[in-house]
Image (cartoon, rainbow, N blue to C red):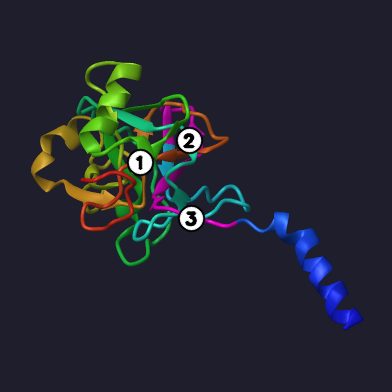
Amino acid sequence: MAFLRILCLLVISNIHHVKVVTGKLGVTAVKDYHTAEFGIDYIGCRAWTNPNSMDCNPYQGDTNCDTELPMLCIRVDHSPRPPYLIYGNGAVMPAANYYGWSGGHVSTTLPVKAARFRNRAEASRFCAEALGQEWEVAGIWGAQPHWIPGMNGTKYAGTEWTANKDKLLSGGWSFYTYGNVRNDTRFWIQGPLDQSSTCWEQ
């Protein structure tokens, strides 16, 4: 009995160390690194340059929607892809899929609870109110970003990118974009349209 009483006291005394996740979860992204040569950020599911970075979850979400995080916003102005290099062989998809180009610029808002937004339009309106009329919530699947098979360095960069818009494919998991956002936090983003991992309705 004495052993059981001690065990109960240990459990009670340490219960405040247990993190209980409740409520709906939403998908987030993070900045991995900035390439000053082209003025671009590499943003995606995980910061591979940080050994403590967590993976995102584009299927069920990874962060409680009541958490205050900055919103990642994008202004798509169809800027041609700069000649950044792509390394590696990829995974399920070719490497270029994971190094797609956003065709624009990113910025972030002040931290906000994603649960306050009922749909994507409200999330994008929040971006526009904070940053300007043409800004909307960013995503890393679907319409943002894009890649072309065989692109790397100067291949399919600049005017060659613009001239081959008919070859654009939708990318996922990570992308390059103009900008230099903060790297000390994750961001709320739009998740895949065929999954339930976004805090708001599609």
Q: Residue furthest front?
A: 1
Check if residue 74 falls in the magenta segment. Answer: no
Q: Is 73 in front, or is 103?
A: 73
Q: Residues within 10 Å of mark 2 (few under 14, many from 20)?
A: many
Q: Taking 147 as reference, is 12 above or below it?
A: below
Q: Taking 140 as reference, is 160 above or below it?
A: above
* Quarter of the rendering occupied by the N terminus: bottom right
Name the secondary structure under disc 2.
strand
Name the secondary structure under disc 3.
loop
Between disc 2 and disc 1, the foreground one is: 2
Instruction: Please report the residue visible at 24 percent of the width from the left and 42 percent of the height from the top.
Output: 144
Determine which quarter of the picture holds residue 118. Answer: top left
Determine which quarter of the picture holds residue 106. Answer: top left
Q: Position of residue 130 (x, y in %)?
A: 35, 18
Q: Is residue 114 visible?
A: yes
Three-letter amino acid code at the position of disc 1: Ile
**Residue tagged 3:** 22
The range drawn in magenta is 20-41
Q: Is 183 in front, or is 171?
A: 183
Q: Taking 109 as reference, is 51 above or below it?
A: below
Instruction: Please report the residue visible at 67 percent of the width from the left and 59 percent of the height from the top.
Output: 18
Instruction: Please report the residue visible at 37 percent of the width from the left and 65 percent of the height from the top.
Output: 91
Q: Is 50 in front, or is 147?
A: 50
> Gap between marks 2 and 1, in whole Å?
10 Å
Query: Mark on residue 189?
Result: 1
Q: Residues within 10 Å of mark 1 (few under 14, many from 20)?
A: many
**Residue tagged 2:** 69
